[in-house]
Image: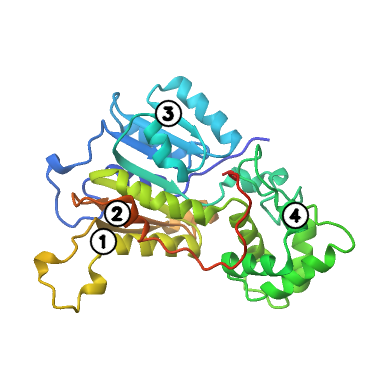
Amino acid sequence: MAYSHRTVLLEPAIDALLSPAFGRRSAVPAAEAPPLDGVYVDGTFGRGGHSRLLLSRLAPQARLLVFDKDPMAIAEAQALRAADARVEIAHDGFATLDAQLDRLGIDQVDGVLLDLGVSSPQIDEAERGFSFMRDGPLDMRMDTSRGQTAAQWLAEADQEQIKEVIADYGEERFAFQIAKAIVARRQSGPLCTTGELAQLVAGTVRTREKGQHPATRTFQAIRIHINEELAQLAHALPAALTRLRARGRLAVISFHSLEDRMVKQCLAAAAHPGREQARLPIPERDMPQPYVTLLGRVQADEAEVADNVRSRSAVLRVAERTDVPLSLSEAMGFVRLPGRKAAPRRAGRAGR
């Protein structure tokens, strides 16, 4: 089946990485512009929309490292690599940014783009198990070659674990009732399809948000857990900040509040590292200096939302590195993960 995939915030995201004028009210001297022959990272290749536009604006000697966990996305990336030698591929999540850059002998990069969450082709393929609107196997793995499926986890997890995942990652106020219903259902047989789970949740959630399916938050939460999405983001943000050279850009597109909150808090902490000490009698010269400059926040305009409804919740946040040295341990302190009591999942990478 052919899909018409429309990349969200395509032009703004690439402008965020390359345009000296992005997020600035005054002109930027050409000498300070990000070098178009630099090294860039697309942390979520998907079907390559952002990567292709980025490559079209980069010099022949530039390099682009693309990440994805999805085997189908990697196949698409390999086809692009065959046509453009500037492309390097990592079949892994962006949490392995440090290791992959070390593998390639790259110390610093000029731009990092992260387009978070599930991609449209994954949602549209019923057999991937992401959508409550299309009945299919209850899988939800971004990388179908490894890791535990949603059905397997729901068959093994106890009620408290299921409740905490749905409450923490879905911000669902009926998490207890949903978890209880899932465990009760297991007595008569496992949940195997997205339709079965969606029907169970719909019968449990008695009040519905306008315009939203009652299973939306539950599906989001289980998907985030299965793919360790927030943990991966918590590793990727500090790595990106420490690997960016001075005036290098980090651009992150988020689609739900948990992701966006993490990105916002991380970048704010990096931009204002002395905020907690502001009221102390410390001379200005001794205060921590900003590690990044915040360049703004962008959302899809009315025309894009009208053309692609999936863009309506997208938020692009952009920051530019200063020349203040930053260690990985310092950068890790900028990230806050939602609190969890559930035991960590067994070792092994899940996939995008």
Quadrant of residue 164 in the image?
A: bottom right
> Label 2 belongs to which residue?
319
Q: CA distance from mark 3 to mark 4?
A: 35 Å
Neighbours of disc 2 within 10 Å: few (<14), some (14-19), many (20+): many
Using the rendered view, name the quadrant where residue 76 is placed: top right
Q: Nearer the viewer, residue 246 or 44?
A: 246
Location of residue 337 in the rendering, given as x and y in whole percent from the top left corner = 47, 63
Residue furthest right in the image: 188
- Circle number at residue 271: 1
- Quadrant in which the C terminus appears: top right
Give me the C-alpha separation between circle 3 and circle 1: 31 Å
- Residue 192 to residue 178: above or below: above
**What is the spatial separation of the Cα atoms under label 1 and label 4, in whole angstroms?**
42 Å
| 2 and 1 marks in contact (CB < 8 Å) | yes
- Answer few, some or many: residues within 10 Å of disc 3's Cα (few below 14, many 20 plus, some between 14 and 19): some
Q: Are marks 1 and 4 in contact (CB under 8 Å)?
A: no
The percent coordinates of residue 32 (x first, y second) are 15, 43
**Relative to 60, residue 344 above or below:** below
Instruction: Inspect the image, locate mark 3, and give the three-letter code of the amino acid beneath it.
Output: Glu
Horizontally, is 49 left or right of 222 in the view? left
Q: Can you identify the residue that label 4 sits on? A: 194
